[in-house]
Amino acid sequence: MAHILLVEDDKGIVENLTEFLQKEGFTITSVDGQEKALALLETSVSDYDLMLLDVSLAEGNGFAVCRAVKANTSLPVIFLTASGDEYSVVTGLDLGADDYIAKPFRPRELVSRIHNILRRYGKANALLEYKGLSVDMGKGTVAKDGREILLSALEYRLLLYFMNHKGMILSRSRLLDALWDIAGEFVNDNTLTVYIKRLREKIEDDPQNPALIKTVRGMGYRMGE
């Protein structure tokens, strides 16, 4: 999964964001100031796939970092800004930032934006595979043993979430949060049950005894060991 350089001097944000993004499968390196960020990029810029950059740093500022990054590298940058700070947003975009997100932000919205930028730069996994099941993220198609399977938009997103979190037990509440963010509308518990049932009917050899999306009693669901 992608390696993200987080440039942020708020220790609480660094700890919480690092923990969350690591659970999402990302590798995180963090620094707390302008000079440290630039020194790190000077020696190992190829190690990173994306930068999360706070505009306001105790040491230096995010604008100087973004300017240097965009002048010398092709590293994508997402600005973290204070809510309603229009000046920072405009300045960051003018300097070449690829996107911005205002604090406080929903972590899953940030993850979605990260994935969008990585796909734009060709750094995301284009093909996901598991036990004969394949998802071509570039084309948005799904196949089982070489035969294309037609999924609804929400079924596709649900499958993509399972494929990106193989081996992890995903609680119903976590899946609901993910689908809510993706769909842009509330998805209730009954709807989740229906979509998991429909998805299993389309991808499992025996939907009554699923081998791909397994139920972990009392905990949720898991794809993979």
Image (cartoon, rainbow, N blue to C red):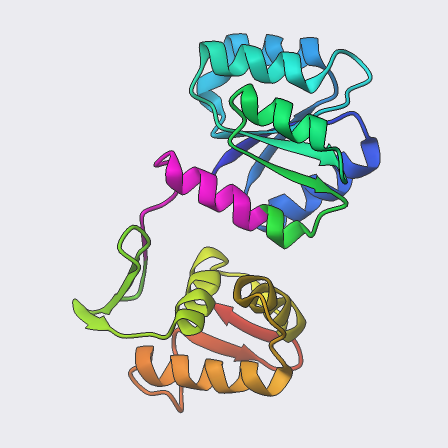
Is residue 212 visible from the viewing direction of this image?
Answer: yes
> Horizontal and vertical percent for residue 208?
40, 91
> Horizontal and vertical percent for residue 54?
70, 27
> Horizontal and vertical percent for residue 96?
51, 22
* Residue at x 40% of width, y 70% of height: 153
* Residue at x 73% of width, y 27% of height: 8
Q: Is residue 149 magenta?
A: no
Specify whether 15 is left or right of 40. right
Nearer-the-camera pick, 133 or 193: 193
Specify whether 182 is left or right of 132. right
* Residue at x 47% of width, y 30% of height: 49
Specify whether 109 is left or right of 153. right
Is residue 224 visible from the viewing direction of this image?
Answer: no
Would you identify the image quadrant in which residue 156 lies?
Answer: bottom left
Nearer-the-camera pick, 146 or 219: 146
* Residue at x 83% of width, y 37% of height: 12
> Horizontal and vertical percent for residue 110?
61, 46
Q: Is residue 119 magenta?
A: yes
Nearer-the-camera pick, 151 or 197: 151
Vertical relation: 69 (above or below) 147: above
Q: What stretch is highlighted in magenta?
A: 111-128
Q: Which residue lies furthest to the left in this view?
A: 146
Total residue callouts:
0
Vertical relation: 151 (above or below) 104: below
Vertical relation: 44 (above or below) 90: above
